[in-house]
Amino acid sequence: MIGLFCQRKHRQVVLCEDCQRLLAYAYQRLDHCKFGNDKPTCSQCTVHCYKPAMREQMCAVMRFSGPRMLFTHPIMAMRHLVRTIHST
């Protein structure tokens, strides 16, 4: 999602510095998540582990990339949708 966001919004072939930082931060937070592999989607998680500024950036990325994922990566989008529905 971050790659799609950066490509379309920042007109970059590779991730820009801001998007690289956001991706590294997301991986760091996932590595330290207490839920591990059973982590629910962020919108349904009881523990918000992102700092407010980073959470706002990630929300912007997801808001932009989410609908576009159906066209660029339909299988990944469907898996995410199923996971979201299943965890409710």
Image (cartoon, helix red, strand yellow):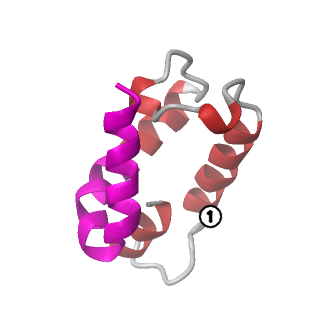
Query: Given the current orientation, which residue lies at the most extreme bottom position?
Result: 13
Residue 44 image position (x, y, % from top left): 41, 25
Label 1's element?
helix
Which portion, as a residue range, is magenta?
Answer: 61-88
The residue depicted at 56 percent of the width and 71 percent of the height is 15
Measuring from the top left, give residue 80's x and y in whole percent. Answer: 39, 50
Check the picture and name the quadrant holding the C terminus: top left
Q: Main secondary structure of the magenta part?
A: helix
Residue 9, visible in the rendered structure: no
Q: Amino acid at mark 1?
A: Glu
Q: Nearer the viewer, residue 31 or 60?
A: 31
Q: Position of residue 3 (x, y in %)?
A: 48, 68
Please tell me whether residue 42 belongs to the stretch shown in magenta: no
Measured as percent of width and height from the top left, residue 55 is found at 49, 34
Give above or below for 29 relative to 75: above
Depicted 37 relative to depicted 10: above or below = above
Residue at 44% x, 68% y: name it.
6
Residue at 31 percent of width and 69 percent of height: 74
The residue lying at 59 percent from left, 27 percent from top is 51
From the viewer's perspective, tell me whether residue 22 is left or right of residue 27. left
In the displayed structure, 31 sits above or below 61; it is above
Quarter of the image that includes the N terminus:
bottom left
Question: In the image, is 9 to the left or to the right of 6?
Answer: left
Q: Which residue is mark 1?
A: 17
In the foreground, 4 or 54: 4
Between 75 and 70, the one nearer to me in the picture: 75
Viewer can see residue 35 = yes
Q: In the rendered structure, does residue 65 fall within the stretch colored magenta? A: yes
